[in-house]
Each structure stands twice: as C-alpha cells, then as structure tokens.
Amino acid sequence: MKRTILAAIVLLIAEAFIVCAMLLIPIPIPIRVRILDMVVLSIVLWRVGYDLFRPLVNLAVKNPPEVGSLGVRWTGQISYLLFAIGFAIIGVIYLIPFVYQLLGQVLLVGLLLLTYYFAMHAAEMVKKVSQREDAVLEGREQMRRALSQIQDEITIGSNVPEYFRASINDMEDKLRYISPSDNADAISYEKQFADIATRVSIAMADFAMNEESIKQDILRMQRVLDNRKKVRN
C-alpha cells in the first residue's frame, strides 16, 4: 500500500510539472497545441509510470503470462513515446496545423492500443501453452502418485507378499522411462492406470481377502503401463 501511495504521489508531481511547463514555456505555441501536447505527455507519463511502479511479472503464478507480452508491450510503449514526442516537437518547429497534429497523435494512440492487443494475445498464448504442458505432465504425475500411495500401504502393512512388492517396484522403474504426451491414447492409459492403482490401494486394507482381485488388477496395471509406453507423441 505504501508503495502504491508513493507511486501515485510521484506521478501526480510529474503531472503537475508537465502542466506547468506546457503553460509557462516561453514559446509562441497556440493554446490548442499546448493542450494537445500536454495530453500526449500525460499519456506517456501514466503509461510508463504504471509499469515502473508495479511488478512487471506476477511471480506468485507459475509461468506468468506477462512474460510473453512484456517484449511486445514495451516495444510498443517505447515506440509510442519516441514518435509521439518527436511528432509534437516537429509540429511546433514546422508549425503543422493543429488538425493534422491531432490526427497524427490519435493515430499514434491507436497504434499503441493495437500493440496492447497483440501483447494480450501473446500473453494468452503463453497461458494456453502453460496449461497444455501442465495437463500433459499431470497424467504421468497421477500414475506416480497412485504408485506412491500403494508403496505407502506396503510400508504400513506387514502381510504383503514379496511378488506384489516386486511388481510395484518394477512398475515404478518402468514409469521413469515414460515421456509426457498429449496424445489422447496416452491420457486415457494414464487415467486407467491411476484408477486401477487407487482401487488396489483401497483393497490392500484386507490383502488376504482381496488377494485374487488385487492380482487381476496388478496384471491390468502392467498391461496398461506397457500400452502407455508404446504411445509416442
């Protein structure tokens, strides 16, 4: 909050300086042109000041979308700053009629807004790519968590046969060599594997009574895992 208040005070002081400078500058400039240039400088001030007094990237978010838009946005802002101020100076030096100065500045603002549109589009693309990557990784992580849950049950229980421990360890080893994939078949196999593993974990509460069904599910898990390994991107 203190930083926001300080930023607002600094920008207001800078705005007051712009107004005073444009009104008191000892150059014969028509009042309409003074007001136009005052508005242009105010746009530059508040647009640049907004970025300088706030975090450019939200570090609390994984893969922040601002990363994809910073380059486009700052290129547009710096270009606008240079062209807008340069055009205003040229207008004063060469006495360009007010209507043409106004049209030129409006055109530059329009180009600035167009830059923001492209920046928003770039940020949205970064967000979509991040979401797609997270979805691709999530399926494999589900498989690992499901096996980890079974390993936890093995650690707690003392009536688990050795063949069962060996099968789970073998599947964990195989899982290390599975690459993430956004293939529909891969996603389906990953979900099947996690669902069966969860069922096995629940059945282990009474391993002796559920041993036959657990054996069948272990065979299903191995089959699904083998099918998942065969899937390529």
Image (cartoon, rainbow, N blue to C red):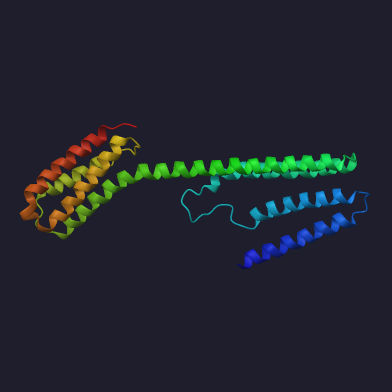
| Residue at 68%, 45% in the rendered image | 77
Residue 155 or 187: which is nearer the viewer?
187
Residue at the limit of the structure toward the bottom, as seen here: 2
Total marks shown come to: 0
Q: Quadrant of the C terminus?
A: top left
**Quarter assignment of residue 102:** top right
| Residue at 63%, 64% in the rendered image | 4
Residue at the limit of the structure toward the front, as seen here: 99
Residue 96 location, x and y as percent? 87, 39
| Residue at 18%, 40% in the rendered image | 222
Q: Quadrant of the N terminus?
A: bottom right
Residue 201 location, x and y as percent? 18, 53
On screen, residue 4 versus residue 80, left or right, reads left
On screen, residue 100 versus residue 174, left or right, reads right
Residue 74 location, x and y as percent? 65, 45
| Residue at 66%, 55% in the rendered image | 50
Residue 128 location, x and y as percent? 46, 42
On screen, residue 110 versus residue 146, left or right, reads right
